[in-house]
Image (cartoon, rainbow, N blue to C red):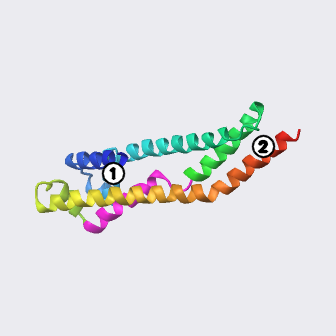
Amino acid sequence: MQRRALAGLLVASVLVCVTAAASDAPESPALKYFEESGLKVALEKQRSAIEAMVRSELQGMIAQFSEIREQDRAELGVIVDDMIRKIMGAYSVDETLRVYAEPFDRNYPGDEFQKAQALLSTPQGQKMSETIGEAVAAGSQYSNAKIQAAFREAMPDYIAKLRALAKSRTHQ
């Protein structure tokens, strides 16, 4: 569903022609366009939603450790925050925007990107629409893979810390 929402945002944003002065032209017109069109904000919201999901998952794990006393929950909060920092540090919104821009830069070199924005009803416009789908898929795969890898890497340490804390508290 998030992929469809992002695809919808991209299609809608491409319909609104955003042009920059030639002197302000960035290295990647697609990247600048995505930043100006609101995609960056949408990706930041998606990242926040992912962070909330990860936090919820980790807190659900903590709930499985009934032997941990209530007063130790604050220490667990620090462990959860550390785990989330590691997971969310696996990628940034700016990196994801660059991943989104790559197919456009490859398929629309030079000033072709700006020209294509005005040509959505032509075959070139169809190419833009197909590239939007490619960019959305690439961005989603990139961020999901980074999160999954970071989660798998950080989980053994997280579980070990939880178990050590639980064990230390039950022997007091």
Taking 24 as reference, is 76 above or below it? above
Compared to residue 120, the image places residue 68 above or below, namely above
Which residue is the site of mark 2? 166
What amino acid is found at the position of numbered circle 1 in the picture?
Phe
Q: Which residues are magenta?
A: 89-107
- Judged from the image, the secondary structure of the residue bearing numbered disc 1 is helix
Looking at the magenta stretch, what is its main secondary structure? helix
Q: Quadrant of the C terminus?
A: top right
Residue 98: image location, x then y, percent? 40, 59
45 sits to left or right of 79: left
The residue depicted at 43 percent of the width and 41 percent of the height is 45
Split into 4 quadrants, where in the image is the N terminus? Answer: top left
Q: Which mark is residue 34?
A: 1
Residue 109 in picture, x, y percent from top left: 26, 67
Closer to the camera in the image, 36 or 124? 124
Judged from the image, the secondary structure of the residue bearing numbered disc 2 is: helix
Total marks in image: 2
* Image-quadrant location for residue 126: bottom left
The answer, for residue 132, to whether it is visible in the render is: yes
Given residues 93 and 130, the one toward you in this image is 130
* Mark 1 burial class by Cα count in 10 Å: few <14, some 14-19, many 20+: many
Residue drawn at the location 24% of the way across and 51% of the way down: 19
Comparing labels 2 and 1, the label whose residue is closer to the camera: 2
